[in-house]
Image (tube, helix red, strand yellow):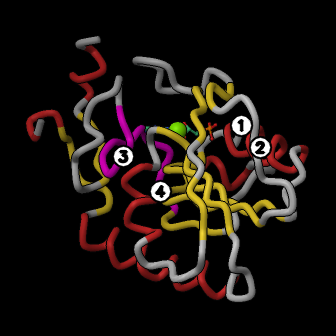
C-alpha cells in the first residue's frame, strides 16, 4: 500500500489532536441536549465518527446512512443518492450529520434536506475535511476539521475504488494508481 502513496497531507497525530478539539466544539454546542442523533455517512466517515463519538459525553443514537456519490473509480461527484435507510426516524431530534469530506456539497445538501423534511428539530453537519473548491460553494459545514487543497485524498476512512480506507494518515495517491484502473 505504501508504494501507492505520493505524500501524506495530514498525519495521524495531527488528525487525533484535531478530532479531540472538534469534539470539544461539538460538546459545547449540544451541552443542553441529551438526545442527539449522530448520522454518519457510510462508508467514508466510519473511522472519523468512531474516534469522534468516544470524546463526546452526551446521550446519543448513532444511525448510519449510506449515500452513493463516487462509485468505483470515479474521482468526481456523480450526484448523490441515498441507498439506506428507506425512512429516517428523527422527528423532534437534534441531528448531527458526520461525513469524511465536503467536496461539491451535493451529499450534505441532499442529506440535510431529507432530514429536515423528516421532522428533525435541528440538522447540523460535521466534516473532517473540506476541499478548497468547496469554500466558493454555497454548502458549508458547521464543524470542519481541516481545509485541504483540491486533490483526491485517501486514508482515515476515505477510499479510492474501495481501497486505502485503513491508512492511518490522510494521503495523496501516486498518479500511476489512477492510470492502472
Ligand atoms: P460531495 O457530494 O461532492 O461533497 O462529495 C462528498 C463525498 O464524496 C464524500 O462523502 C466522499 O465519500 C467522496 N469524496 C469527495 N472527495 C473525495 C476524496 O478526495 N477522496 C475520497 N472520497 C472523496
Ligand atoms: Mg462519502
- Label 2 Cα neighbours within 10 Å, binned few <14 / some 14-19 / many ≥20: some
Q: Which residue range is magenta in the image? A: 147-159
Residue 109 - label: 2
Quarter where residue 8 is shown: bottom left
- Label 1 Cα neighbours within 10 Å, binned few <14 / some 14-19 / many ≥20: some
Q: Disc 2 to disc 3, how far (Cα)?
A: 21 Å
Mark 4 or mark 2, which is nearer to you?
2
- The mark nearer the N terminus, 4 or 2, is 2
For residue 26, above or below residue 40: below
- The mark nearer the N terminus, 3 or 1, is 1
Q: Are marks 1 and 2 in contact (CB under 8 Å)?
A: yes
Residue 107: x and y in percent read 67, 38
Residue 26: x and y in percent read 61, 78
Q: Are marks 2 and 3 in contact (CB under 8 Å)?
A: no
Horizontally, residue 157 falls left or right of residue 22, namely: left
Q: Dot 4: what SS?
A: strand
| Residue that numbered label 3 is attached to | 157
Mark 1 or mark 4, which is nearer to you?
1
Q: Are marks 3 and 4 in contact (CB under 8 Å)?
A: no
Residue in front for this viewpoint, 118 or 147: 118
The C terminus lies in which quarter of the figure?
top left
- The mark nearer the N terminus, 3 or 4, is 4
| Residue that numbered label 4 is attached to | 148
| Residue that numbered label 1 is attached to | 106
Answer yes or no: disc 1 within 8 Å of ligand 1: yes
Answer yes or no: disc 2 within 8 Å of ligand 1: yes
Residue in front for this viewpoint, 154 or 93: 93
Q: Residue at x 78, y 53 (%)?
A: 90
Q: Dot 1: what SS?
A: helix
Quick check: is 151 in the magenta stretch?
yes
Residue in front for this viewpoint, 165 or 144: 165
Amino acid at each position: 500500500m505504501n508504494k501507492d502513496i505520493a505524500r501524506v497531507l495530514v498525519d495521524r497525530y495531527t488528525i487525533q489532536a484535531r478530532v479531540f478539539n472538534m469534539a470539544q466544539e461539538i460538546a459545547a454546542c449540544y451541552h443542553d441536549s441529551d438526545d442527539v442523533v449522530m448520522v454518519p455517512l457510510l462508508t467514508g466517515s466510519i473511522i472519523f465518527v468512531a474516534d469522534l463519538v468516544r470524546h463526546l459525553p452526551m446521550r446519543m443514537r448513532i444511525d448510519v446512512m449510506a449515500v452513493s456519490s463516487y462509485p468505483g473509480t470515479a474521482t468526481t461527484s456523480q450526484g448523490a443518492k441515498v441507498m439506506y435507510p428507506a425512512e429516517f426516524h428523527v422527528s423532534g431530534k437534534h441531528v448531527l450529520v458526520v461525513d469524511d469530506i465536503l467536496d461539491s456539497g451535493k451529499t450534505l445538501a441532499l442529506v440535510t434536506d431529507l432530514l429536515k423534511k423528516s421532522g428533525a428539530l435541528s440538522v447540523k453537519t460535521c466534516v473532517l475535511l473540506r476541499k478548497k473548491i468547496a469554500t466558493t460553494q454555497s454548502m458549508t459545514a458547521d464543524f470542519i476539521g481541516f481545509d485541504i487543497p483540491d486533490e483526491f485524498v485517501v486514508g482515515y476512512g476515505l477510499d479510492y475504488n474501495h481501497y486505502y480506507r485503513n491508512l492511518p494518515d490522510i494521503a495523496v495517491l501516486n498518479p500511476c494508481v489512477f492510470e492502472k484502473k
